Image (cartoon, rainbow, N blue to C red):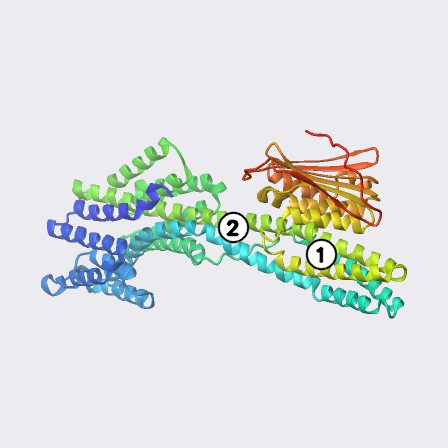
Amino acid sequence: MPLLHKSIGYLFLVLFTLSFAVGGADALALGGCAFQVGLLVLAERRASTRQWVLLAQITLTYLPIPLVGGSAAYQGSVLAVTVLWCVPTRWRWVLFFLVVAGAGFTRESWRGDSHAFAYGVLTTGAIAIVMYSLLRLPALVDRLTATRDDLARVTLARERLRVAGRLRAALGGRLGAVMSLLGEAGREVERDPVRARAAAVAAALATRAMTETVRETAALHRDVAVLPRDHEPVARLLPRLTLLTLAVSLASWTVNQVLESGQHRPFIAVGGAAMSALLLAELYWPRWATACLAVQAGIALIPLPWLGSSWCVWLILLAASVLLTQRGVWAWVVVGGLFALRGAYTEPAERLGMRAGWVILAMEATLVLVGLARFWRLSVELNRSRAELVRITLQVERLRVARDIHDLLGLTLSVLALKSDLITELITRDPRRAAAEIEEALRIAGEARGEARRMADARGTKALGHELRSAALAVGADGARVRLDRDDSLPELAGAVLAPVVREAVTNVLRHSAATRVWIECRVRENRLRLTVRNDGAGAVADGAGQGLRNMRARVTEAGGVFRVEVADGEFQLTAEVPVTEYADCTVPAVTTHTGSVRGALPAAPATEQD
C-alpha cells in the first residue's frame, strides 16, 4: 500500500489541528487540540492505553463547560472518534451518537439557534466519521491483503470437500454392487458356472457404466461457473465503509453550506447535490470521468462571479475531481489555482489569516475526498484480485481433479472392466484361473474405492514404481506380452509427475490399440527422468487428439518437461521427460523386470531413439 494511503489519517489530523492555528484560536485552545489529537493517536496505536485515554478525553471535553461555559469546537469530534476506538462494539455506536448529539449543547454559540445547533451536530458527526475512517481504513486494507493466502487455502479445502461429495454422488453404491457381483461369481464359479458368468457379465457392464459416468464428471468439473462467496468480513466492510464515509462527507458538506448561507440556499443545495453526484459518477463510471469533470467545472466556475463566497466552496469538490481523474503536474497546477480562487472568494472583510485558514480547510476537505475515493477504488481492486485468486485457485484445482479422475480412476475402472471380461471367458474354460482373476478384480475394485476417496487430495497419487508394476499387470491381463525396464530407485518429485502419465498411456494401449507387444521403460539419464511406452497395433488415437493425451502433455509441460508421440510402421511410441529437481543419485543400477502374460514374455526391448 502506498505511503500516502498509510499516513492519510495522520495527515488529516495535522491539517485539522493546523486549521485551528490559522483560524484565530488562542495558544491554550491550540495546545488542547494538539494534546487531544495526540491522545487519539495513542489510543489508535496502543490498545492497552485506550481505557485511560477515553477517561482523559471525556475530562478534557466536558470539564471546561462549568468553568468557561462551553467546550471548543474540535473537542466533540475528537471525543466521538475516541469512543469509536475505545468502547466495546456493543455500546460503541450508541455512545458515539450521544456524544455527537450532545455537541450541540457544549458550545454557547450553538445554543438557542436551531440552525447553529444542527450545523454543530452535523459538523461534529461528519468530522468524527471521517477521522475514524481515515485512521481505520489502512488497517482494513492491510488485513484484506494479508488474508489472500488464507482465502486460497479455504477455497481449496472447500473445493476438495465438494469434489469428494460429487464423486460419492457419481459412484454411490455402484462399486459396492460390482464387488458383490464379483463375490457372487467367485462363490458360484464351481457350483453354477452359468450363474457365475452372468454375475461377471453384469459386473463388467456396471463397471463400464461407472467409467462413463466418471469421465463425464471429469468433463463437467473443468469449468468454474459460479465463484463462491468471499467469507472475509473485511472484504464487504471495506468498500461499504469507504463509500458510506464519502457519501456522509459530501452530504454533510452540502447541508452545512446550505445552513451557513444566508441567501441563495436553493442554488447552493442543487449545486452541492450535482457536484456530489458527478464525483460519485466519476468513481463508478471512469470512462465518463472527463465528461463529468467538464460539467463540474461549468457548475463550479460559471456562477462564481455572481454568487461569490457562498458558491466558492464547490471549488473544493472540483479540485478533488481533478486529482481523481487527471494525471501529471498540470493537475496539481490546476488544483493550486482552485485553492487560490477559494482564498480569493472569501468575505472581503476577513483578514489574511482567516483567508489562509479557508485555504487550509479546502486542502483538508480535498484530502478527505481524494483519500476516501482512492480507498474505495483500492478496496474494489483488492476484492477483484481476491475474486480472481479464488477463480484461479478453483480452475487449477478443478483441472487437476478432472485430469486425475480421467487418468487415474478412469484407468482403474477400465482395468476392472477388462478383468471382468476375462473372468467371463475363463469361467467355463478354466474355473481355477477364473477364481484367481476374481480375487484380483476384487482387489482392483477396492483400489478404485480408495482412489475415489483420495481423489480430493492432491497428494493422493501413488508412487511411480507402483504405477509401473500395475501398468505391466494390466497390459498382461489384457493378453499382450509386456516388458518393463526401470531403474531400481526413481526420484519422488519427478515420479509424481509421470505416475498419472503411466496410467493414461496404458489406458490408451488398452482402449485404442490391438497391441500384442508392449514395452515400458523408465530410467534417469542426465538428470532427467524419461518414460517410454511403445506398442504395436497402433490405433486411430495415435494422432494425439484424445483428451487423455492432452492431459498427459499438460502435466509434463507444466513440470518443465517434454512430451511427444510418434507413429511408425504400425507402432505407437509415447515419450515423456521431466527434469529431476531434487534427486542426488542419478546413476543407480538398473534392473530388468519381465512380467508374464497369458502369451509369455517378450525379448529385450529394442533400442529407442534418444534426444
Which residue is painted at 64% across and 46% down in the image? 464
Q: In this view, does 89 lie to the left or right of 34?
A: right
What percent of the width, then of the height, locates residue 610? 70, 30
Amino acid at dot 2: Ala
Q: In this view, does 238 lie to the left or right of 13?
A: right
Amino acid at dot 1: Val
What percent of the width, then of the height, locates residue 351? 16, 42
Q: Which of 134 and 141 is in front in this view?
A: 141
Vertical relation: 326 (above or below) 128: above
Using the rendered view, name the quadrant where residue 166 is placed. Answer: bottom right
> How many neighbours does mark 2 have within 10 angstroms: few (below 14), some (14-19), or many (20 or more)?
some
Q: Name the residue under label 2.
A: 387
What percent of the width, then of the height, locates residue 505? 73, 44
Of the two numbered discs 1 and 2 in the rendering, the one whose residue sits closer to the viewer: 1
Using the rendered view, name the quadrant where residue 334 is placed. Answer: top left
The secondary structure type at the circle numbered 2 is: helix
Q: Mark 1 points at which residue?
A: 214
Q: Is residue 2 left or right of residue 413?
A: left
Using the rendered view, name the quadrant where residue 448 is placed. Answer: bottom right
Contact, CB < 8 Å: mark 1 with mark 2?
no
Which residue is painted at 77% across and 67% down in the image? 183
Which quadrant is the C terminus positioned in? top right
Q: Can residue 5 be seen in this view?
A: yes
Which residue is painted at 77% across and 37% down in the image? 604
Q: Which of 11 and 77 is in front in this view?
A: 11
Q: Is residue 579 left or right of residue 115?
A: right
